[in-house]
Amino acid sequence: MNEEARDFLFSTSEKPNTIINPDKPRLLVALGGNALIDKEQEGTIAQQFENLKVPILQLARLSRDYKLIITHGNGPQVGNLLLQQESCDQVPRLPLEILVAQTQGQIGYMIESTLDSELMRLGIIDKQIVCLITYVVVDENDPAFFQPSKPIGPIYTKEQIGRLNHPVRMTAKGYRRVVASPQPKTIVEKHEIKSLVDMDYIVICGGGGGIPVTRGGRRFYGMNAVIDKDLASAKLAEEVGVDILLMATNVEGAAINYGKNTQQILHQVKLSEIEQYQKEGHFPPGSMGPKIEAGLRFLRGGGGRSIITSTITIEEAVAGRAGTIITR
Ligand code: ADP
Ligand code: MG
């Protein structure tokens, strides 16, 4: 981000702290991986905290007018944990469900503390934040379990893959482990989240798409899988009942003919129009595809507005002046 954009974003022409409006609309913001780690960066904790200020400052301001739920990705962080544990034989390896839980704590803490500081800086002293470990139920018969396709973790050489005991696939970056990415069926903590949002708590939850679990009688069993965070966020948005689902990423919005000379960012679009573009294959799996699908599912489930925008323009997009805004 250039100096000018940063100055604009961090300028604080402050309104005094406003009285809480009990009928405030509900906004769910799903933060993409780049909100913490820019692809060009090493990804130190100091860099992650610095990057987070950009979306979080805007969310702090938005919390005056919206009830807020914040979800987030965890790809780079889980990747680092996998690399760390694969570099050390002295402690037992942890299953993926535990690594996802770890990143909910790690990233949740970073979001919560950054948000807390921003709220204080803005003089908003009546906001409470809760960070919630979140399980998401998946179906053990989901076809994804029979065809693991989601690349995660480090890149391996051909020699290394012979020694691995998990499925591996050749990707654009090299050989990587692949895991199942099943569909989110329901958010286990949806009632708790709804109650907290009703009370105007800012809720950080659903990190990394949630900890995938299956239900067996009265118990939950953690699964070796990852759930797409945009699809899990759409499910949460639907189950909790939010007005706006906003997915913040590292591009201005969703485009047709992405990366070609004819590329065109979509601004205000209708659901039926996006469905057509989706059929034509403009949104690839693993990146823009799930965001579009999440946006569509949210609207079909009764949601009001789905937005895809850059982490820099969250406020502008909520105001209708940036990003891809999809409505029915
Ligand atoms: P996040 O971590 O925010 O989920 P992703 O990498 O999964 O981010 O998705 C955002 C990426 O999607 C962008 O960086 C962009 O390169 C890619 N992308 C693919 N197709 C499109 C498209 N049609 N319009 C916009 N971006 C696209
Ligand atoms: Mg993504």
Image: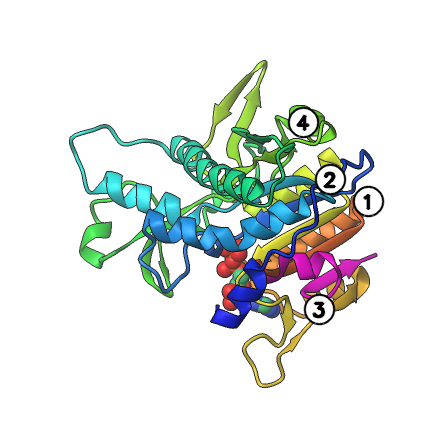
Determine crowd level at label 1: few under 14, some 14-19, many 20+ residues with C-alpha closer than 10 A.
Answer: some
Contact flag, marks 4 and 2 (Cβ < 8 Å): no
Residue 223 painted magenta: no
Amino acid type of disc 4? Leu
Q: Which mark is residue 196?
A: 4
Give the side of residue 182 with respect to residue 328, left or right. left
Quarter in which the C terminus is drawn:
bottom right
CA neighbours of label 2 inside 10 A, class few (<14), some (14 to 19), many (20+): many
Distance of label 4 from label 3 (alpha carbons): 37 Å
Q: Secondary structure at mark 1?
A: loop
| Front disc: 4 or 2 | 4
Q: Image point 41% across, 60% down: which residue?
A: 38
Q: Residues within 10 Å of mark 3 (few under 14, many from 20)?
A: some
Between 172 and 248, which is closer to the camera in this rendering?
A: 248
Q: Select label 1 or label 4 by which is in front.
A: 4
Residue at image mark 2: 238
Gap between marks 3 and 1, in whole Å? Answer: 21 Å
Residue that protrudes farthest toward the left in the picture: 90
Q: Earlier in the sequence, mark 1 or mark 2?
A: 2
**How far is disc 1 from disc 2 in space, using C-alphas?**
7 Å
Q: Is residue 36 visible?
A: yes
Is label 1 in contact with label 2 (beta carbons under 8 Å)?
yes
Residues drawn in magenta? 313-328
Residue 302: assigned label? 1
First of labels 1, 4 by sequence position: 4
Q: Amino acid at mark 2?
A: Glu
Q: Under tag 3, what secondary structure?
A: helix
Outermost residue to the top: 218
Give the camera-side residue of 41 and 231: 41
Residue 165, x across and y down, in percent? 28, 40
| Residue indicated by mark 3 | 277
